[in-house]
Amino acid sequence: MIQLADDYKKRSIRFLEIWQKQGWRMKVYGISYQGGQPRKELVDTARTLALQTVPFPAMNSDRYGVGFIGVHDGKDSDFIFIDWWSNENELNHHVYISKHGEKPQFEYCTPKGLIACTWDLKVLNFERDCWVMAVLNNPAGTPDIDQYLQYHMNEDF
């Protein structure tokens, strides 16, 4: 039997920006347990971790220099996930977690098997659908990464 600690509470999921650095263009999303946007220091940490995680060069024959970053200011833990597209339809996914507190201490946890929480999965699903619409099955007949970058999620889920 699952014993829930709390009743389900919707969380704010908001597009924050398109972050561009060293050839990468990444959509940045904020998820917050308290509503609104995640703390600034978490977003800053996410940018630093992204530069340590993504491969370089950003673009080559099977990598497009495009993806997304999730910054989840959670209840008990904070999450950062860094994702980029490659090989037409593959998503590279890396997860970092820190206990929720004053000074974040993020640990790389992808090798432990953790993928995402339910709110993070909402972003992953949205981005998958955007990739299919703009790149894999674009009605115009050609993949359009700029169109993909124009799709943004903003909702309470």
Image: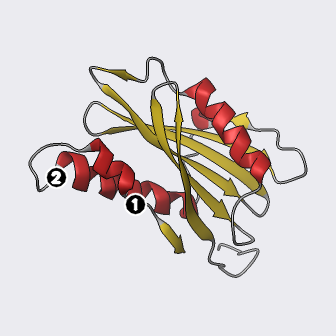
Along the line of sight, which residue is nearer the eye, 78 or 146?
146
With 57 as the anchor, is 10 left or right in this view?
right
Q: Residue at x 32, y 56 (%)?
A: 130
Q: Decide: few, some or many residues near mark 1? Use Cα within 10 Å; few <14, some 14-19, many ≥20.
A: few
Along the line of sight, which residue is nearer the eye, 41 or 97?
41
In front of the other: label 1 or label 2?
A: 2
Q: Which mark is residue 138?
A: 2
Q: How far across and down, in percent of the image, does residue 110 sit?
A: 58, 36
Residue named by callout 1: 126
Along the line of sight, which residue is nearer the eye, 107 or 147?
147
Along the line of sight, which residue is nearer the eye, 118 or 19?
19
Q: Residue at x 45, y 54 (%)?
A: 124
| Quarter residue 77 falls in | bottom right
Q: How far across and down, in percent of the image, does residue 119 sit?
A: 56, 64
Which quadrant: the C terminus?
Answer: bottom right
Q: Is residue 106 above or below residue 41?
A: above
Q: Identity of the amino acid at label 2?
A: Asn
Q: Residue furthest right?
A: 102
Among the two numbered marks 1 and 2 on one chain, the one whose residue lies closer to the N terminus: 1
Name the secondary structure under disc 2: loop
Q: Identity of the amino acid at label 1?
A: Phe
| Quarter residue 1 falls in | bottom right
